[in-house]
Every structure is written in C-alpha cells, then in structure tokens.
Amino acid sequence: MKRARFTEEQIIAVLKEHEAGAKTADLARKHGISEATIYNWKAKFGGMDVSETKRLRTLEEENAKLKKRLAEQMLDAAALRELLSKKW
C-alpha cells in the first residue's frame, strides 16, 4: 500500500487555508497536489481537528483488522462445513 505523503496536521493546515479563502488551484499548485485531492480531503476531513483525524485513522485501521479477522473466520467455517458435508 502506498504510504501517505501528508500527515494529518498538514492536511488540516491545507484545509484551513482553503476555508480562509485561498483558491483551490493556488493551494494545489503550492502544495503539489491536485484539486481533486483537496476536495477529497475536504469531504473526509472537513471540519475536523488534528486529534479527531488521528482518532479517525486509528478507527479505520482497527476496522480493517476486524474485517480481515471476520473474513478469515468465515473462510474457516466454510471449509469446515464442506469437510463435514463430504464425510456423511
């Protein structure tokens, strides 16, 4: 997976500049990102503080781990069901 180029603090700083009235095209050029990236960040992190974004990141990581564990458990259960059905 590609590593994030910007930290939560940097993302929030860019969004604060945007809220202060800076034009999207100017911000994109200044920080070396696309305008679409700014809009995606705004949709995801708009109105958040740095601490809230860190909390969101940890929750997303935890959610991904839980989804992976669930998928593994479902695969194990399906394998056991198949094994039992062949035995009888």
Image: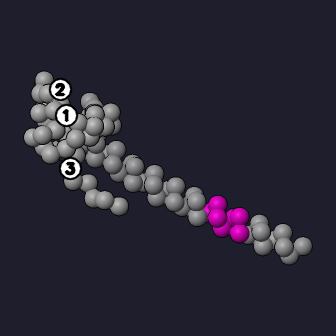
Above or below, comparing residue 49 to residue 65 in the picture: above
CB-based contact (under 8 Å), mark 2 and mark 3 = no
Q: How is the image coloured?
A: one colour
Which residue lies under the disc numbered 1?
15
Q: Residue at x 84, y 69 (%)?
A: 85
Q: Position of residue 42 (x, y in %)?
A: 28, 33
Magenta region = 73-79
CB-based contact (under 8 Å), mark 2 and mark 1 = yes
Q: Where is residue 67 in the image (x, y as percent from the top left)?
A: 52, 55
Q: Is residue 85 left or right of residue 68?
A: right
Q: In this view, does 81 lie to the left or right of 46?
A: right
Image quarter of the C terminus = bottom right
Q: Residue at x 86, y 76 (%)?
A: 87
**Sequence-first disc among 1 and 3:** 3
Above or below, comparing residue 60 to residue 72 in the picture: above
What is the total number of numbered labels drawn onto the structure image? 3
Image quarter of the N terminus = bottom left
Q: How far apart are marks 2 and 1 (CA)?
A: 6 Å
Q: Which mark is residue 7?
A: 3
